[in-house]
Image (spheres, coloured by chain):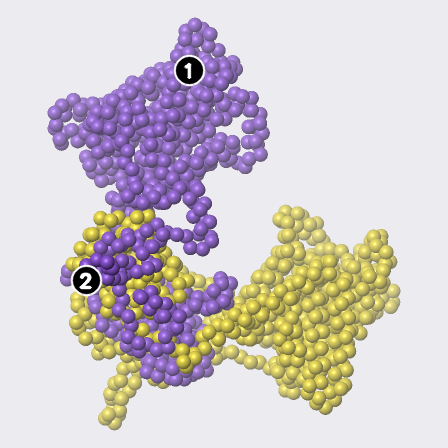
Chain colours: A yellow, B purple
Amino acid sequence: MQDKNIADDGNSASPNGTKSPTALNPDLVVREKKSGVRPGDTYVRIQSPHNRHFRRVGPGHFVATPEVMRPIGGVEKAYRRFKGVLIGRPLETAEEIHQRLNKVKALAVFGSDAISSCAYATEEMLVVLVVAGSSALYLSQFTALAIGVLLFIIAFSYRQTVYAYPNGGGSYIVSRENLGQIPGLVAAAALLIDYILTVSVSIVAGSAAVSSALIAAGFGPQIDALNQTLPPHFNVNVLLSLFFIALMTIGNLRGVRESGAIFAIPTYLFLGSLGVMLALGLFQSFTGTLQPAQTPPIVPAVETLSLWLILRAFSSGAVAMSGVEAVSNGVPAFERPESKNAAITLTIMAVILGSAFLGISYLASQMGLVPSEQTIISQIAQAVFGTSIFFYIFQLATMGILIVAGNTAFADFPRLSSVLARDNYMPHQFLFRGDRLAFSTGIVALASIAAFLVVLFAADVSNLIHLYAVGVFLAFTLSNTGMVIHWRKTRGPGWKRSMIINGVGAVVTLVILMIVIVTKFALGAWIVILLIPTISFLFLLIHRHYSGVANQLRIKPDQMPPETNDPIVIVPIDDVNYASLRAISFARNISPNPVVLHVAVLPDRAEKVRQKIAKHVPNAKFVVVESPYRSFVRPMLAYIDALHSQRSDAFVTIVLPEFITAHWWEGLLHNRTANRLRHTFEKHPNVAVVLVPYLLEG
Amino acid sequence: MQDKNIADDGNSASPNGTKSPTALNPDLVVREKKSGVRPGDTYVRIQSPHNRHFRRVGPGHFVATPEVMRPIGGVEKAYRRFKGVLIGRPLETAEEIHQRLNKVKALAVFGSDAISSCAYATEEMLVVLVVAGSSALYLSQFTALAIGVLLFIIAFSYRQTVYAYPNGGGSYIVSRENLGQIPGLVAAAALLIDYILTVSVSIVAGSAAVSSALIAAGFGPQIDALNQTLPPHFNVNVLLSLFFIALMTIGNLRGVRESGAIFAIPTYLFLGSLGVMLALGLFQSFTGTLQPAQTPPIVPAVETLSLWLILRAFSSGAVAMSGVEAVSNGVPAFERPESKNAAITLTIMAVILGSAFLGISYLASQMGLVPSEQTIISQIAQAVFGTSIFFYIFQLATMGILIVAGNTAFADFPRLSSVLARDNYMPHQFLFRGDRLAFSTGIVALASIAAFLVVLFAADVSNLIHLYAVGVFLAFTLSNTGMVIHWRKTRGPGWKRSMIINGVGAVVTLVILMIVIVTKFALGAWIVILLIPTISFLFLLIHRHYSGVANQLRIKPDQMPPETNDPIVIVPIDDVNYASLRAISFARNISPNPVVLHVAVLPDRAEKVRQKIAKHVPNAKFVVVESPYRSFVRPMLAYIDALHSQRSDAFVTIVLPEFITAHWWEGLLHNRTANRLRHTFEKHPNVAVVLVPYLLEG
């Protein structure tokens, strides 16, 4: 019945307005007698066809169905299909899964970042030491040992955090809670930078694993030739890295959540093959049968060996520590008892990382390996396995864990930026969740910046690494210092012991931070040192803006918006036609006395317009402003100002007829004055512009 | 008194709406007792300070003062000052000057285009003939003679037009009136293309005059060296041409109207020096003392001499005729008796052009000149004058008249396109007159296309010339054919004689048109042959659009816009705050029952919003639509559709609070949902979007 009525209304443009309008029904329901039930019972349902679009859950309360999202038009359909294939079907907010991880999976999810660093940390030490010639390379064993001790201290101090913050204790939260806003923001800035560098460094190192395998297989000349043809800043490693970043972006937009399985395979494949390689390698080394595939060249010294050089090697190797804090972020994802399981996982991770790093560094020293186009770890693998299938499996596993490691940043960066957005330190866009519930803005931002860095540094780990360590150790220092304050405040059982552990951690990481800053400053660390305060300052600016807005928007009981009974309404018209009469009729809804304004570029036209108005809208207030300089907007602005000044508290509404053309090219045939005016008044407070559309048929 | 009241209103946001508002006074006047005059007399004046902005000429009728145009803000001020220097102060529409020209000035204004062609027409014939070797060059005398006869016929036929159309009879008007719409549009398309080519060809030839003078002065190697360093498509002539086009664009935007003086100087300088050169040259030729500066090289034949080649040479030379129709366009600008003066001027012009062209062609033949980097006319001048000051004066004069010739197109193209726009065949933007009353759109369009052609054809006259002649002779043919019909219709005194003259003109120009098409087709004329129907078709499309619009907008007495007493008003809100309350309060002006709509991405927020609405706007119709897929726009669209279907004849108004940020960067911190929604509904007929602005203080 209802539907029939609507159809009747629809097919005849009612020629007058005298007919009393149907009462509007915002609840969209039809009440019907229920048949076959007790008389008097009614049955409530949403009007057809809107019942396809909404489910009614209460009076004036609907839930949209997937039908609402159905694409309109061919272009959108194609886009949706493409996006569907790439990202997957959209998920409802309620479909979010919160998964708990056992220790085996947790080690893969939270440990891969840290463990993967052993794939490049040794090499980065050697890159520094080789400056003093081949004979200095043996020193890497000792810097590796120092880093191992350091790792032990840091892991131990993070065990404290895991117990103290069972809901997740990243550096931002710990610093903010215990040290205050500014240290919290500094930690957050350092972490965001680190996450970006984690992606760049891991992916570039992963690509290096692929190209090392290719070099070992004898494709070196081809790679060199290909690099020659590529433009500056681009080489095979850059292309591989960009490909991996694109893959990870898509994967994360699809919502590769912390589903252990995907992460477990490459992680344990790497751990297994690494274990085999180290065992075999150490055995061969002790039996004296370990020989590098190519005899390493004797590199002459270009610098004398100095404490400075050793400290620089140490700083480079210290990046092995990056990712250690991941477990402390993820405590709530562990199976019960969360903190205990997290602490055990943390310890296992540190032991694996420490022994792998030491083992690799020892073997590299023993063989006197020198950094070259092929990575150090791949040189060791080739020496141990020969150029056999095991060598290639090991390379594949190395690439796998490095990509998984890069992927942890794809979880961490969007999560931290959404927390910062929620706390009003970052734009609220970072709170937006895409079709698959992932924080799309964060994912895309991270991928873009990381890809930019990969290209800027031509996919060279050694160049990127200089930027890396500052952020890592700044976050460590702030987090540990925060924990010291935490223990002093809470004074729970054993607080003194915990405080000492974190205190030692704080002092040690601070010392390393200093070493890193001093040794790496000129090599690129200065960029990060400038960026961290800049970003922190931006956080503060954004926070101030959002607070200001919230303040201004707060409803103060004594300051309600004025209910203007007679607003100022102006209808600028160029000519009297159906569209302008429609606009005038709309304006009459708002005000009984709209002012119809004609800005006359040609004086003789003004008279014609006046006559037409007198004929069609005899009771209108009609005003002509002649514009001798042919400008349309300026005289109108001046007139509106003049009217507005008569009642400056009133709200001015400008009602404009707007032509909607059927085809875009037809739009070019109109001056689009309406749109230009809207732009003019966009920044004018207290002036609202209403475009009353008039569809021109094609 | 009034002013004081306004000030009082301004400084306190009135806390309630109960105060009865001051009645609005759209007439902006204050009535005051006149002091010192008879009691009862009143004095009407515009309220201060608006009296600075407007002059009142009657009730509700104002004239804006220049004060209205005063720039706002530093950027606009600087822009205006820059534009002021470049273009000049804005002119009032009433300041337009209509100047009458005597025959001396008229020859300069309307004749320069035609006369200037003798600077390149001979050369273009030689460029074709030289293919058959140096020995074929003497034939140019005979093709020149044929063209001279032709010129006589065409000039004579245009004398008829001048008498028949004293209000100006361009090809478009004559063809349209006598042959119908399509021939008129074809003539218009041909003319527009010709005007563009007139600019390109004249300016390129003018630049060639400059570089020829430089080459004669010994700067040839430097020019070659400079050309080497420029990118492809650019050379010294291109740069010079672009410079001249820019200069002419600025000049014409300033409004270099047909003020004879500016045009007279270079025209008569050229005529004078050309006369001297021809007289001296012919004398030297007869006495046998005329010697070229460099002995022309003997060019071997690469093609045998054929009728085909001679016809091609003739076609190239025939461009000398371009610009002959200019006088017939400009009849109303002549002093009385207009037609007679115009006819005399036309005859003088044809005599000058004919004898100059023949003279130059004769001298070039006699000396056996061969086209080279230096133009033919400049080679003649150098032979006659030696490398003396007179030679340089002649080059300067050549450049001058060519630029003046190019400039006539800057008057013709915008004028014709404005006529076409007025007749709804071209976009109405071409009717727009800039600060200086010039048709800015046409000027800028002409300059852009001409500059594009100059670059595309690397400022080579010989390449451009192939495109030129088709349009010229097509317009001639149509115009003459139109005149034949005209005489047959009007049958005034001597109509038979006139008809024969124009008939001969039509046949001759048609034959030449055919020759031009056949000989030049493959060389580039095909472009014009494709373009003319394409442009004509576009004219028709545009005309159909504008007619359709006019039809749809016509007010039919039985189909007045409906006066909806109860429009559908929807206020989508994200939260309840001061801005959204303000939007709701605005919506209440339009409808007593606006629907407040909250699209809930997070279900728990919906409940909070409902509570706040219940508290602040207890009587609002509040609707929640939950959006499980987090889309905001789609569920809203579906809900609005559902509401609208209840009363499909009603007009839907969507009222949105919009944040206006004080700084642009702050805008990045907001999702700008309001603006996105406005774009969504832009193409939705019957839905008006009102953005109620809320200014966020910085």
Which element is circle 2 on?
loop
Return the chain for callout 1: B
Give the x, y percent position of residue A427: 53, 69
Vertical placement of A70 versus B544: above or below?
below
Most foreground residue, A330 or A572: A572
SS at circle 1: helix
Q: Are marks 2 and 1 in contact (CB under 8 Å)?
A: no
Relative to A218, does residue B407 appear above or below in the rendering? above
Residue at left 74%, top 61%? A520
Q: Which label is found at residue B40?
A: 2
Q: Is residue B309 left or right of residue A378?
A: left
- For badge 2, the amino acid type reads Gly
Res B526 → quadrant: top left
- Amino acid at dot 1: Met
**Dot 2: few (<14), some (14–19), or many (≥20) neighbours within 10 Å?**
few
Instruction: Point out residue B452 in the picture as x, y percentages from the top left corner.
Output: 43, 38
Residue A123 left/right relative to B299 = right
Can you say whether A551 is above or below A571 in the image?
Answer: below
Which image quadrant is residue A217 in? bottom right
Which residue in the protein does label 1 denote?
Answer: B277
